[in-house]
Amino acid sequence: MTLAGYKNKKDELARAILALKTTNEAERFLRDLLTADEIEEFGNRWLAARMLNSGASYASIWGKTGLSSTTIARISKWLKKGRGGYRLMLSRLEKK
């Protein structure tokens, strides 16, 4: 990679994610990129987004994930008024 490639770290990470083809590949990449605790945290956040989308209460989300009410509120805010990433993935996965 050239030095210029390091300037767009987020773009390069997004491109790497887009190159993944299977769940197994994604799991392997995530485990190399992140710690087990980070993967667990991201998994909990994704579960919270799905539960919020289904109308679950903060208390039930906390019970399933252990996420703080602040984190759950932030996910709820992003789900409603974020950049649309959660909504995009929820709608795509609902179709499958």
Image: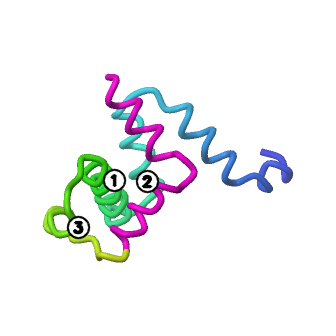
Magenta-colored segment: predominant secondary structure: helix
The image shows residue 20 at horizontal and vertical percentages of 49, 32
Q: Is residue 79 magenta?
A: yes
**Amino acid beneath label 1:** Ala
Residue with the mark numbered 2: 79
Q: Residue at x 17, y 69 (%)?
A: 59
**Amino acid beneath label 2:** Leu
Query: Which coloring applies here?
Result: rainbow
Res. 87 image quadrant:
top left
Q: Are marks 1 and 3 in contact (CB under 8 Å)?
A: no
Q: Are marks 2 and 1 in contact (CB under 8 Å)?
A: yes
Judge from the rendering whether residue 54 lies leftward or rightward of residue 12; answer left or right. Answer: left
Residue with the mark numbered 1: 49
- Which range is magenta? 71-96
Instruction: Please identify, in this view, whether the residue under mark 1 or under mark 3 is nearer the observer.
Output: 3
The image shows residue 95 at horizontal and vertical percentages of 34, 23
